[in-house]
Image: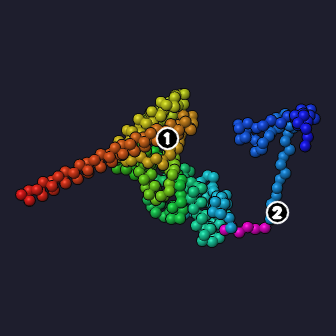
Amino acid sequence: MAPPDQDKSCIPELQAALGPLLLTRASPSDLSSHSPGSYTIARGCPDNIPPKEQVLPKWTGAFKLFDFPRELRDRIYHYIVHVPGGVHYTTQTKRDLQDRPSSDIVNLFLVSKQVYYEASQMFGRSNTAWLSSSCSPREGYHKPLTGLLRLFPDPAADALTSVSHVYHDTIARPLGMWGMAPSHDSIASGGDGTGHFHKRQKPGETFCEILRDAHVISQRFPKLKVFDAVWYVGLRFHEYPIPECVVHNIATFLKDYGSREEAVKMWLDLMRQWLQKGNVVPLGCVWFSVQGYSTDGFGSEMDEAANEAYQTLVKESKDREDIEASGKMWLEEMEEATRCKRKGKSGKKAIQ
């Protein structure tokens, strides 16, 4: 054993021998950013840390899919079935959709029954199903939503969490060589009065239509979390003069550098007015994507203001429903208490 004097001189001798290398104990704040250990080099370390050696797997053969846990299998399914732009559901084949690759998804579904079940569940959780296309405004006009949902496959509908549908305030009628058909003239002239439009309604009517469709869609898709309503306000093209529109007024306000809080207030006032006339309960899963010209003020700020106002409206409606439900329970309890009192009085009279 070394004498005590030599033990005391060990630390100075080590410091003199190591030179500029200084070891310091790691502080608690450094433990989260550094690799675990008792000490870290604080001075004298190189600027560039050499990269770690790449470790390659030794096994290059095939793996059995069902040897993996369900979480890893779902991750594998996700890489195959996920479509970034969403999937367009249609009951008939269209030429503009034939060039989209889908052979990998179809081949995966044909492997086995268990793979089909698991992959279809991941297909519904990973993708947004488009019920209509924005390329053809007349598609949503001539296609009833209830009939379309009735034909939707049950396995995908049970797992689907995101749905998108396109709405138009107005759908212009293209003019032919001879102009507008006489059957679309004014009612006084013997026509149907539609004129240059297949469909023409106010934004408030479209808003209530979206909320009603949300109830229909939520019943068909039990796991629905997001219903993306792509809303084309007014006319899509400047073929005809755009009438005065309250939604365009909000877009113009934002374009002129208006505050977001004021835009949310304008949206909220409009939605409250529309909801009073529509007699429909708003659902929290609805998300509005208000479409229009960016030069008119439509953009991400317009969508954020609309959705913030709508979520406030949903909260107000929910609070109102809770109050009505509690009031209904109170009335039922009072009626039950009154009924019991009457029975007690009638029993006493019978005894007398």
Q: Position of residue 338 (x, y in %)?
A: 19, 51
Q: Magenta region: which residues?
A: 60-66
252 shown above or below 233:
above
In depth, the one of 221 and 60 nearer the eye is 60
In depth, the one of 333 and 195 nearer the eye is 333
Q: Locate the N terminus and report the quarter of the image it occupies.
A: top right
User: Residue drawn 51% across and 52% down?
Assistant: 225
Q: Which residue is mark 2?
A: 58
222 shown above or below 266:
below
Q: Which quarter of the picture shows residue 298?
A: top right
Q: Does the image show residue 30? A: yes
State the predominant SS element of the stretch in magenta: loop
Q: Position of residue 162 (x, y in %)?
A: 54, 53
| Identity, as a three-letter code, of the amino acid under mark 1 | Asn
Secondary structure under tag 1 reads helix
Q: Which residue is mark 1?
A: 307
Give how far apart the Cα atoms at labels 2 and 1 are.
52 Å
Q: Nearer the viewer, mark 2 or mark 1?
A: 2
Secondary structure under tag 2 reads loop
* Coloration of the structure image: rainbow
Q: Most extreme residue toward the right, as rendered? A: 17
